[in-house]
Image (cartoon, rainbow, N blue to C red):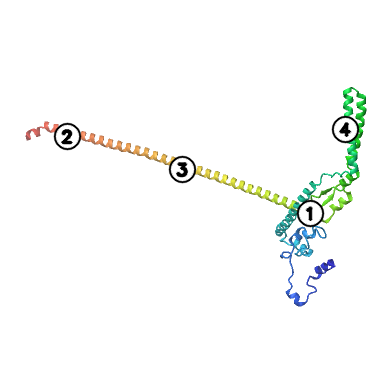
């Protein structure tokens, strides 16, 4: 009936039997609504795993709809919602496994106290038989000691064989009944570490297979497998993120080193240019100094030449004047004038 109803809902819509007034207030549910079960959308809902078992969780309060699940799988937002739904399922499963592991520990402690097989108590008749046998063994040992002191070895060995027979008889009385011991061993319990169920040790293979194929065992196996995969995926994602961060840090470090090297090269290039400019400036200063020195020498030479020429000119004039003066002093006209 439920399958037919679901098929009709898929073909004609969930509002197929509603009146016009009901249709007006009806809101179609979508896969991303709050009332839709996210774990059912991606994997499974734990409420569906333990129906009619001792671990039954009851019905899920949220909507389970295969049509919505199909719509979710075809949605372009599928990948964006999967991590959110997986986190919700992991949180639910983690709580279930934590509670189950507490139960398993209690069961393990309980079994640890039942490892010793209890010895069946002796009856009054068995106790009386043991007392008689122990008394006979005591007397025989006293006789064996006396015979040993007397050097009668053969007689002592014969009595020792009787003692061995009495000890064997004593052991058979003290030893638990083999049938009772076998029954106790057969009914010894063990614990399933997956689902926490108590099992009969060394049980028949078909019963063990029936347990493994049961809803409770399969359900907790699915939960534990999902948690294992989820944690492994999270750990892998963390490792990949760590490696990506390390790669980014290495890339940033490499870029900083390259920028530093480039800055050093630019600084070295600027320093070379500055050195070249300083060297050129010094060369210009030296050239100016040499030119100034040469100019000074030329000016000095010109001045010295001018001075020497002036001196020569003055000397020549002085000579000429003296020569004229001497000529006048010798001239008769000049003498007559006097």
Q: Position of residue 10 (x, y in %)?
A: 80, 68
Q: Are marks 1 and 2 in contact (CB under 8 Å)?
A: no
| Mark toward the start of the polypeptide (4 vs 3) | 4
**For discs 2 and 3, the disc positioned in front in the rendered view:** 3
Q: Which mark is residue 220?
A: 1
Q: Quadrant of residue 35?
A: bottom right
Q: Which residue is at a point 88% across and 38% down the rendered structure image? A: 131
Marks 4 and 1, how far apart at CA: 63 Å
Q: Which residue is at a point 89% across and 27% down the rendered structure image? A: 144
Q: Is residue 47 left or right of residue 299?
A: right
| Mark toward the start of the polypeptide (4 vs 1) | 4
| Mark toward the start of the polypeptide (2 vs 3) | 3
Q: Is residue 70 above or below residue 201?
A: below
Q: Helix, strand or loop at disc 1?
A: helix
Q: Is residue 80 above or below residue 272?
A: below
Q: Position of residue 306 (x, y in %)?
A: 27, 37
Q: Which residue is mark 4?
A: 138
| Mark toward the start of the polypeptide (1 vs 2) | 1
Marks 2 and 3, how far apart at CA: 67 Å
Marks 1 and 3, how far apart at CA: 79 Å
Give the quarter of the figure containing the C terminus: top left
| Residue density around tag 2, few if under 14, some if 14–19, many if 20 or more, within 10 Å | few
Q: Which residue is mark 3?
A: 274
Q: Which residue is at a point 87% across and 27% down the rendered structure image? A: 145
Marks 2 and 4, how far apart at CA: 182 Å
């Amino acid at each position: 009936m439920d399958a037919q109803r679901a098929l009709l809902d898929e073909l004609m819509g969930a509002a197929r039997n509603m009146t016009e007034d009901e249709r007006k207030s009806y809101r179609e549910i979508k896969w991303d609504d709050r009332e839709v079960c996210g774990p059912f959308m991606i994997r499974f809902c734990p409420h569906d795993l333990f129906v009619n078992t001792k671990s039954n969780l009851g019905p899920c309060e949220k909507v389970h709809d295969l049509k919505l699940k199909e719509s979710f799988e075809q949605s372009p937002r599928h990948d964006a919602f999967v991590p959110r739904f997986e986190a919700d399922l992991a949180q639910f499963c983690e709580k279930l496994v934590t509670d189950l592991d507490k139960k398993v520990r209690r069961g393990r402690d309980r079994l640890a106290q039942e490892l010793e097989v209890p010895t069946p108590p002796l009856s009054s008749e068995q106790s009386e038989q043991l007392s008689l046998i122990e008394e006979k063994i005591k007397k025989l040992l006293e006789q064996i000691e006396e015979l040993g002191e007397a050097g009668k070895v053969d007689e002592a060995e014969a009595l020792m064989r009787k003692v061995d027979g009495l000890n064997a008889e004593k052991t058979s009385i003290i030893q638990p009944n083999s049938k009772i011991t076998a029954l106790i061993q057969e009914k010894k319990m063990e614990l399933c570490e997956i689902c926490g169920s108590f099992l009969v040790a060394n049980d028949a293979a078909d019963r063990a297979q029936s347990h493994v194929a049961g809803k409770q065992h399969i359900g907790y196996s699915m939960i534990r497998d999902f948690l294992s995969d989820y944690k492994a995926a999270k750990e892998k994602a963390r490792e990949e993120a760590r490696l990506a961060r390390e790669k980014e840090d290495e890339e940033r470090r490499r870029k900083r080193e390259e920028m530093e090297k480039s800055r050093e090269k630019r600084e070295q290039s600027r320093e070379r240019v500055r050195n070249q400019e300083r060297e050129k400036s010094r060369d210009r200063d030296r050239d100016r100094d040499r030119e100034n020195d040469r100019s000074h020498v030329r000016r000095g030479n010109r001045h010295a030449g001018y001075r020497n020429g002036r001196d020569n000119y003055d000397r020549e004039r002085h000579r000429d004047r003296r020569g004229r003066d001497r000529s006048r002093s010798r001239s008769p006209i000049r003498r007559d004038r006097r």
